[in-house]
Amino acid sequence: SPPCILSASLLAADFSCLSSEISAALAAGCDWIHIDMFDGSYVDNFTIGPPVLKALRARHPNVCFDCHLAVKDPAHYVKEVAAAGASLMTFHAEVLGGDTKAMQEVAGAIRAAGMRPGIALAPETPASVVMQLLKCGDVDLVLCMTVTPGFGGQKLIPEVLNKVSELRRVFPDVNIQVDGGINASTSVLAVQAGANILVAGSAVFSPASVIMYPTAAVGAGCS
Ligand code: DX5
Ligand code: ZN
């Protein structure tokens, strides 16, 4: 499977000093920075918007900003998010009713805007919804939410790992991301199931700032 990546979720960082939180995560060995851009529509939380992303990009010109948009109308934000400096833009299949053509259109717009597209599935959404998209190579990653999207600090829903295994069986080379409740122990289970991109918020930005990398990655058999 593709290389193992740890993406640190800023949702658990200190919002009063995001730039230095990013530096700390990168210095500790995190690969990507996961930015939860929630507008309070699809999920009940209002977090980071394009102006904040833009300010962070100015401070961190080279890092991969892995932007997770839990919003009802992702197409509406493609240009703005690209201009603000996102590397990757992941949107939810549910907001488009799982319609393959609609998802392909948004993914195409994301690519045309110079970003890499990702598709996210809430815990209860089956893998079948994205099979066509992945077969056609329309997206660069599939995000299997391991908690109900919206808030950090929740417990991983173990059933989601069956979906991860199912996807990995069909697509040996696809990037499979997991997000929610990922820590030093659950990351091992997620990687065993076939995930290769781990998103972690509270496990990275704990109050003591004990960053889980490389403990979890090593435990999970990643290099
Ligand atoms: C939750 C977000 C996650 C969140 C994960 O809906 O998508 O990125 O920050 O937080 P932890 O790792 O604390 O579960
Ligand atoms: Zn997220």
Image (spheres, rainbow, N blue to C red):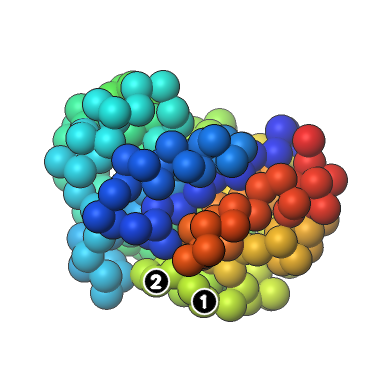
Tell me whether circle 1 and circle 2 mark residues in contact (CB < 8 Å): yes
The secondary structure type at the circle numbered 1 is loop
Q: Nearer the viewer, residue 138 or 206?
A: 206
Q: Nearer the viewer, residue 169 or 16?
A: 16
Residue 101 visible from this viewpoint: no
Residue 31 visible from this viewpoint: yes
Residue corresponding to mark 2: 151
**Quadrant holding the C terminus:** top right
Query: Residue 61, relative to residue 89: is it above or below?
Result: above
User: Ligand 1 near label 2 (Cβ, under 8 Å)?
Assistant: yes
Q: Where is residue 84 drawn, in percent x and y?
A: 22, 32
Q: Residues within 10 Å of mark 2 (few under 14, many from 20)?
A: some
- What's under tag 2, amino acid-wise? Phe
Q: Is residue 38 left or right of residue 208?
A: left
Q: Where is residue 150 drawn, in percent x and y?
A: 37, 70
Residue corresponding to mark 1: 154
User: Ligand 1 near label 1 (Cβ, under 8 Å)?
Assistant: yes
- What's under tag 1, amino acid-wise? Gln
